Image: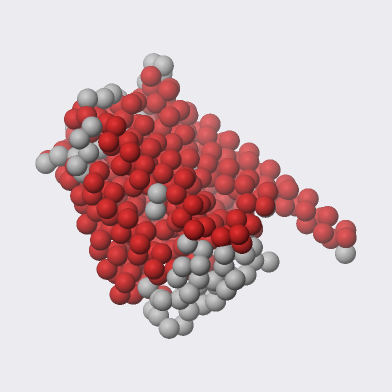
């Protein structure tokens, strides 16, 4: 069984998780607002929508690269110090993104902005679960992730409104300011606990020896791509297929955020009672709702309801986070951070495949079918993981 951090009794869990959630709000705003701002910065930088999707992929690649490197490098650093430096770096590169003069500069700055993302969530999740009883782990992680989901309700629509009203660059300025607020809150509220006893880069790398870790990461990398395939091109779909006005786009983006928030409140509670069935259920849900998107995209009411339902599937990130911490044993920091590498691989894969479907003439609504296939791919990988778990349990029982 994995060894979880001991509960910290010297601080108020709610306030610490709140501080972590503000950082998640900043990350969620930049991750999802970049997608909603795509039509605006594409026009300003002189590129088409599928090419602008590469900017989103560059950020995702930064997460994939940065999560393992920064987590391993900081294995012996106090978690509070790591969190503060990660958010300060995040503030810097998002602020610079607001001044990007060209497509090439935008690509580079979005890559650099993504570097702290995974390590922040991974270390933050460890801090959150150290503050609560073991049977509340999913809910603690879910409460931290609520910052990300609230970003899709408030931060993303606000950034989109700023993009329409005074320029897309102000969306990134908003993220930089929120990140600096997070730095202040963490300095004030986060417990100054040391790194885990015996922590080292080598021990963190030990997570990579477990096949189930790799398989679970693959579930997120493939299965979550469906949500990103739809969401990346949602603003364009609304304007080109639904024929919605630009002013309506932030409202629908907010509905997506409401769905993510509802999912991150409900799903972790289910997962604390039955983790594995909850994960499989979320993947089935994602496959069904993204497929539905292709049928409802032409209707304002239909697409609004469907987007809410798709958003609920975003809770997959929360429950896979706990699954990884269960199977990574004493290398939970790297495993938790790699969860975000996996999801940002999905953030790169989904827009890439969705953009290919659009470029080949299948239409904006075809991203729904792309999303359904990716979710089903993640489900198949997860069922394989479950089967291997059962096989290993039987083998252990036979040995005894």
User: Farthest residue toward the top?
Assistant: 361
Quick one: 298 or 350, which is closer to the camera?
Answer: 350
Q: Going 25% across and 38% down the picture, which residue do you hit? A: 37
| Image x and y of residue 74, in percent | 47, 62
Say above or below: 130 vs 143.
below
Quick one: 186 or 49, which is closer to the camera?
Answer: 186
User: Farthest residue toward the right?
Assistant: 399
Say above or below: 332 vs 110.
below
Say above or below: 35 vs 314.
above
Q: Going 25% across and 43% down the picture, which residue do you hit? A: 97
| Image x and y of residue 32, in percent | 33, 44
Q: Is residue 300 left or right of residue 340?
A: left
| Image x and y of residue 17, in percent | 39, 68
Q: Is residue 64 left or right of residue 216?
A: left
**Which image quarter: residue 105?**
top left
Q: Is residue 96 visible?
A: yes
Q: Going 35% across and 65% down the picture, which residue do you hit? A: 84
């Amino acid at each position: 069984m994995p060894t979880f951090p001991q509960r910290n009794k010297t601080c108020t869990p709610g306030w610490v998780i709140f501080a972590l959630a503000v950082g998640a709000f900043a990350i969620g705003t930049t991750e999802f607002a970049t997608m909603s701002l795509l039509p605006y910065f594409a026009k300003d930088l002189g590129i088409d929508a599928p090419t602008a999707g590469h900017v989103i992929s560059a950020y995702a690649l930064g997460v994939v690269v940065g999560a393992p490197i920064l987590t391993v490098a900081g294995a012996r650093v106090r978690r509070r110090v790591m969190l503060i430096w990660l958010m300060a770096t995040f503030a810097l590169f998002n602020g610079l993104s607001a001044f990007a003069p060209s497509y090439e500069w935008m690509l580079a700055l979005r890559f650099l902005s993504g570097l702290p993302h995974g390590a922040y969530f991974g270390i933050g999740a460890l801090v959150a679960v150290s503050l609560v009883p073991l049977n509340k782990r999913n809910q603690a992680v879910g409460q931290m992730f609520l910052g990300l989901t609230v970003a899709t309700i408030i931060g993303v629509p606000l950034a989109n409104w700023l993009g329409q009203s005074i320029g897309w660059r102000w969306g990134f300025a908003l993220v930089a300011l929120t990140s600096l607020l997070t730095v202040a809150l963490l300095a004030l509220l986060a417990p100054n606990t040391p790194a885990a006893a015996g922590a080292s880069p080598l021990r963190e790398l030990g997570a990579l020896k477990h096949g189930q870790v790799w398989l679970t990461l693959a579930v997120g990398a493939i299965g979550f791509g469906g949500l990103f395939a739809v969401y990346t091109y949602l603003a364009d779909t609304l304007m080109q297929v639904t024929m919605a006005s630009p002013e309506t786009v932030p409202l629908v983006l907010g509905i997506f955020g409401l769905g993510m928030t509802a999912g991150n409140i409900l799903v972790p509670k289910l997962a604390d009672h039955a983790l594995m069935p909850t994960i499989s259920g979320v993947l089935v849900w994602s496959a069904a709702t993204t497929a539905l998107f292709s049928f409802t995209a032409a209707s304002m009411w239909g697409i609004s309801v469907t987007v809410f339902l798709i958003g609920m599937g975003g809770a997959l990130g929360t429950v896979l986070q706990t699954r990884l911490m269960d199977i990574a044993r004493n290398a939970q920091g790297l495993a938790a951070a790699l969860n975000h590498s996996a999801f940002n691989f999905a953030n790169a894969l989904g827009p890439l495949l969705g953009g290919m479907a659009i470029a080949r003439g299948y239409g904006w609504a075809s991203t729904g079918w792309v999303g359904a296939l990716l979710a089903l791919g993640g489900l198949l990988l997860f069922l394989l993981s479950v089967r291997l778990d059962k096989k290993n349990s039987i083998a252990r029982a036979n040995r005894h």
